[in-house]
Image (cartoon, helix red, strand yellow):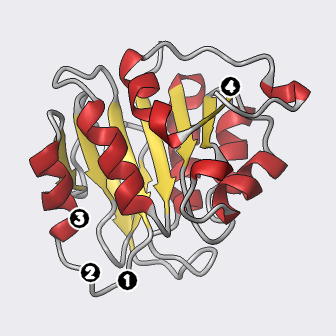
């Protein structure tokens, strides 16, 4: 049984998250942690925009709070977001990783250590390789890993990097991703490893 999902996005992420989060039901059984690359000076628009359109609660992550089902926690601008071993959140102002703060790898790696096989990782559209190492760590710990089909990404560098590094469980087109996540029927696609990358 999965407990949490981590999502990483960069360029094009606003459109991707807007397509996904509103499809999740109000009683969604997982807590969701998101790193969307944004500049240090970014305001709270992203959180408010997504929360207004979603049945789940979308909020900015705060240190010390627990990860709850049907809640989406976005990394604040200028801070790395991490999950502690007691499944509470923490923030860090350590140097950028992959030129990014917040960094997707930092979140994914801390969440993998905490949740192990009970974690789902998802890489969306983006312009660098941030998140690939973290997604591999999730897979190594027995978690379930997903990647947006690069052909449907606004910027395909990030999903292509993840697919090149990790034996992913599913590669899913943007138009099907929200519905797939809402169903919570997470099973590997055996065809993925045979070169058929489209869900």
Tell us which disc is closer to us: 2 or 4: 2
The mark found on residue 46 in the picture is 3
- Above or below residue 97? Residue 177 is above
Spatial separation of the CA atoms under disc 1 and disc 2? 5 Å
Quarter of image, res 131: bottom right
Q: Is residue 160 left or right of residue 82?
A: right
Name the residue located 21 percent from the left edge and 57 percent from the top edge. 62
* Residue 30 coordinates in the image, percent (x, y): 34, 26
Q: Secondary structure at mark 2?
A: loop
Tell us which disc is closer to us: 4 or 3: 3
Q: Are marks 1 and 2 in contact (CB under 8 Å)?
A: yes
Mark 3 or mark 1, which is nearer the start of the sequence?
Answer: 1
Q: Which residue is mark 4?
A: 142
Q: Residue furthest bottom?
A: 41
Q: Which residue is mark 1?
A: 39
Q: Which residue is mark 2?
A: 42
Mark 4 or mark 2, which is nearer the start of the sequence?
Answer: 2
């Amino acid at each position: 049984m999965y407990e949490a999902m981590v999502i990483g996005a960069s360029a094009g992420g606003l459109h991707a998250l807007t397509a996904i989060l509103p499809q999740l039901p109000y009683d969604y059984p997982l807590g969701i942690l998101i790193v969307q690359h944004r500049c240090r000076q970014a305001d709270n628009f992203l959180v408010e925009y997504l929360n207004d359109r979603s049945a789940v609660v979308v909020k900015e992550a705060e240190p010390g709070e627990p990860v709850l089902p049907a809640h989406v926690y976005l990394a604040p601008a200028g801070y790395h977001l991490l999950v502690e071993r007691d499944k509470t959140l923490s923030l860090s102002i350590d140097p950028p990783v992959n030129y990014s703060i917040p960094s997707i790898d930092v979140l994914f790696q801390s969440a993998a250590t905490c949740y192990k096989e009970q974690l789902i990782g998802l890489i969306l559209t983006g312009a660098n390789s941030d998140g690939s190492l973290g997604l591999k760590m999730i897979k190594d710990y027995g978690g379930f890993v997903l990647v947006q089909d690069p052909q449907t990404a606004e910027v395909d560098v990030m999903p292509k990097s993840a697919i090149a590094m990790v034996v992913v469980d599913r590669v899913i087109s943007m138009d099907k991703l929200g519905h797939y996540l809402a169903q919570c029927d997470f099973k590997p696609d055996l065809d993925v490893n045979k070169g058929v990358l489209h869900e």
